[in-house]
Amino acid sequence: MRRRVSVFGATGSVGRNTIAVLEEQGGVEAFEVVALTGAGNIALLAEQARRLSARLAVTADPERLEPLRDALAGSDVEAAAGPEALLAAAAEPADWAMSAIVGAAGLGVSLRAAEHGGVLALANKESLVCAGELLRATCARHGTTLVPVDSEHSAIFQALRGEDAAAAERVILTASGGPFRDWPRERMAMVTPAQARAHPNWDMGERISIDSATMFNKAMEMIEARALFDLSPDQVEVIIHPQSIIHSMVGFNDGSIMAQLGPSDMRGAIGFALNWPDRRDLSLERLDFARLSRLDFAAADPVRFPALRLAREVMEADGLSGAVFNAAKEAALDAFLIGAIGFLDMAILVEHVLDKLAPEAAQSGPDYDLDAVLELDATARRMSGLWVAAYSGGR
C-alpha cells in the first residue's frame, strides 16, 4: 500500500530535496502524493506535481492560480491558490507531511497537518519558535510524531534514539559560523546581501543563508531545540564547527557525548524523517575521514553575533517571546534586503522590538492559541516597520 504524503513548500530548497528523496525511494510506485505547495515558481510546482501525479497543487499567491491551471492543463492535478487553499491542503489526510514553508507563514500549515496523526516532518523552525507548546500539544492530541528535519535537530533526535532522555544533560548545536565568522564587526557593518547569502558549506535559499550569516538561524535553532526536546535554557549550547560535519551532539550525565556526523546535504535529514523509524539507503556522499583529516571547534562569539544572546533572553522570558523574536527577525531581514538598514542593524532592530513587547509576550501564558500568536506577530512587524522608517529617515 502506498504511503500518502504531502510536501508544503515543495519549490524551496528543502522542498526540492524532499521531492528528490521521494523519487529516489520509489516515486509514484511507493507514494500517493496528496498535495504539493509552492509560491512563485509555478513552472517548477507544476512539473513536480506532474512527475509525482499529485492530487493537488497549491500556490500561496492567489494571483497565480490561472498560470498554475494553465501549467497543469491536460493532467489530473487539481490547482488551487491562496492562504485558505494552503490550509485546506494541509487538512487533507496524509501519513507523512513535510512542513517546509519558510517563515511564520508555515505555522498554520504545520498545526493543521499535525491533526492527522502519522509523521510531521518539520523543517519550518518558526512553528516551534513561535508556538512550540501549541504545536507539541496538537501533535500529542492527535497521535502525531514530530520528526525534525533541521540537520541540527535531526542529529539530536538521532543521538537520543534508544536513550533515556532524562539522562541528557545538554545539547550542543554546531554552527559553521557562516561567511563572516572571522570578520571584525567594523567590516561586518559593510556586508551586502550578496555577500551574506554566500554560505560556505550549505546550499540553501536566500533568506536562510543570510540568517546563517547573522547567526539568527542558529538563534532560532536554540529556541527550537528547547521547545522540541523540553530543555531548560542552560541545557542548550552552541559551538562553531566550520566543517559542518558534526551536525550536533548530546551530552549525557555520565560524561559521554553522542554526535551525529554526515555530509552537508539536507537529503540525509529528510531521508531519515521519511523512513523513520527505519533507515533506508540514500545516495549520499560517504565521509572519508582520512581525507577529512581534522574537525575544528571554537566558541561562539555573542559580541560578533548578538542574535545568540537574544535567543537566550527569549528562552528565559518564555511565553510568546519567540513569536516576537521571529517576526522582528523577518522584518529586519526584509529591510536589509532592500537596503533600508545595514547588516548589523538587524540585531539592533530585533532587540528593540523584544524590549518593547516583553510585557505582552510574557502575558500569553501556556494556553495561548494561534490567533494570539498571529496577533503578536502582526504587532511586532508593525513596530519593526516604524523602527525602520525612523532609522531610514534619520540617516
Image (cartoon, rainbow, N blue to C red):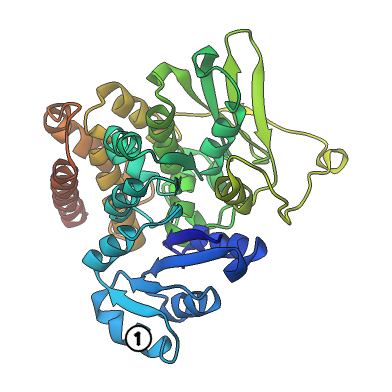
In the displayed structure, 204 sits above or below 374; it is: below
Q: Amino acid at mark 1?
A: Arg
The residue at which mark 1 appears reads as 69
Give left or right: position of 341 versus 253.
left
In the displayed structure, 94 sits above or below 183; it is: below
In the displayed structure, 213 sits above or below 14; it is: above
Q: Quadrant of the C terminus?
A: bottom left
Measured from the top left, where is residue 192 in percent x and y?
44, 58
Measured from the top left, where is residue 207 in percent x and y?
42, 56
Measured from the top left, where is residue 256 in percent x and y?
66, 14
Residue 215 visible within the image: no
Give left or right: position of 258 versus 191.
right
- The residue depicted at 15 percent of the width and 35 percent of the height is 357
| Crowding near the residue tagged with mark 1, few <14, some 14–19, many ≥20 C-alpha atoms within 10 Å | many
Residue closest to the far right: 290
Q: Quadrant of residue 228?
A: top left
Residue 257 visible within the image: yes
Give left or right: position of 323 versus 153.
left
- The residue depicted at 27 percent of the width and 60 percent of the height is 87
Give left or right: position of 356 versus 124.
left
Q: Quadrant of the N terminus?
A: bottom right
Q: Check disc 1 and report its element: helix, strand or loop.
A: helix
Residue situated in front as seen by the camera: 280 or 337: 280
- The residue depicted at 44 percent of the width and 92 percent of the height is 74
